[in-house]
Image: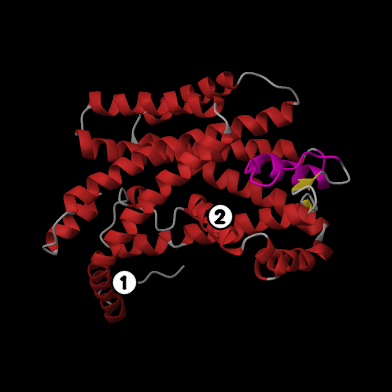
Amino acid sequence: MYYISKGFKELGLPGGKFLAILFSVFCILGALGGGNMFQANQAHAQIQTVVGFEFSSLITGIIFAAIVFAVIVGGIKSIAQVTEKIVPFMGILYVGAALIILLVNYDKIGWAFGQIFAGAFTGLGVAGGFVGALIQGFKRAAFSNEAGVGSAAIAHSAVKTKEPITEGFVSLLEPLIDTVVICTMTALVITISQQLMWDAEAGRYLLNEAGTAIATVGDTSGVALTSAAFGSSISWFPYVLAIAVVLFAFSTMISWSYYGLKSWTYIFGEGKASELTFKVIFCVFIVIGAAASLGPVIDFSDAAIFAMAVVNIFCLYFLMKLVRKELASYSARLASGEIKKYAK
């Protein structure tokens, strides 16, 4: 929102302030939805799957809300201190678990890739609605790595650096790690476990031979499907997944709380009262998300994140000449030796 308003002003373009406020509104909604309610909802679903019995989602929501509030009340430094410890651990934990399953079933990896491509680009994809599948893929990809959404830029802008372009290069790693690596590994595990069995007559996915519960068509309860896939190979892996899901959810919530807070203060002004108001609202929505049905939560989240992306990409179209200028300046100074290179 800051680069939108300042960039449009620098270029002498009208509407920058309005677009910045519009983005801020959508970012607040995205923080409450995809960055909050969805995370609490899926964390509760996986915890319930692991413990093996139903319990009140309010318990999960209240516990998460209390822990998140304890972290975010300390501001960006507190958030950074927690995430820098949690994120590497949860990433290694999840990737390690997926790698073990893939190594155990290494002979099926080629077949799994074949099934994925066949489902996307052959008659299977066309029969299932190629455009619909493509849209769903874009939605999940944007939800995963936030590329083009504009949210991650809020965190990157808090970094202290003399060269903003370098932070842009760092941000390029996010889609690679989130989507290309982690999501591909997840897809391979699900495909190799053969959890998805389609019944054309019934128009739904069936249970596999092990009898594990599988999502029906249109059901996007991905964590239950992923848990079943992990558990089909090694029985105790859902417990590992539960730890990873809880850590992913927690780190995502505290990160998005910062995005939403900066958007909130952009509209309503900074100050302890204003910031505390948003943080309380944010934590209340954690409880709501844990108790709500997944369908409405993910629809709301998708709509808010899509709206953010529309405003952000629209503005980037006009501001890309400034980005090109910064990149050209950085590249020239790097090539001339003005900016020193350090080799390990």
* Residue 136 disc label: 2
* Residue 273 disc label: none
- Residue 66, relative to residue 41: is it above or below? above
- Rate crowding at label 1 as few (under 14), some (14 to 19) or many (20 or more) other CA atoms within 10 Å: few
Distance CA(mark 2)–CA(mark 1)? 44 Å
Q: Is residue 196 left or right of residue 316?
A: right
Residue 99: % across, % down: 72, 55
Question: Can you tell which quarter of the image residue 228 is in?
Answer: top right
Q: Residue at x 82, y 56 (%)?
A: 104
Pick whichever, 219 or 272, lies toward us: 219
Furthest-bottom residue in view? 336
Q: Is residue 143 left or right of residue 334?
A: right
Question: Can you tell which quarter of the image residue 50 is in?
Answer: top right
- The question of residue 84 being in magenta is answered with no
Question: Would residue 317 be visible to someone looking at this image?
Answer: yes
Q: Which amino acid, by three-letter code, is at mark 1?
A: Lys
* Residue 340 disc label: 1
- Residue 211, relative to residue 336: is it above or below? above
Pick whichever, 150 or 172, lies toward us: 150
Determine contact: label 2, label 1, CB under 8 Å. Answer: no
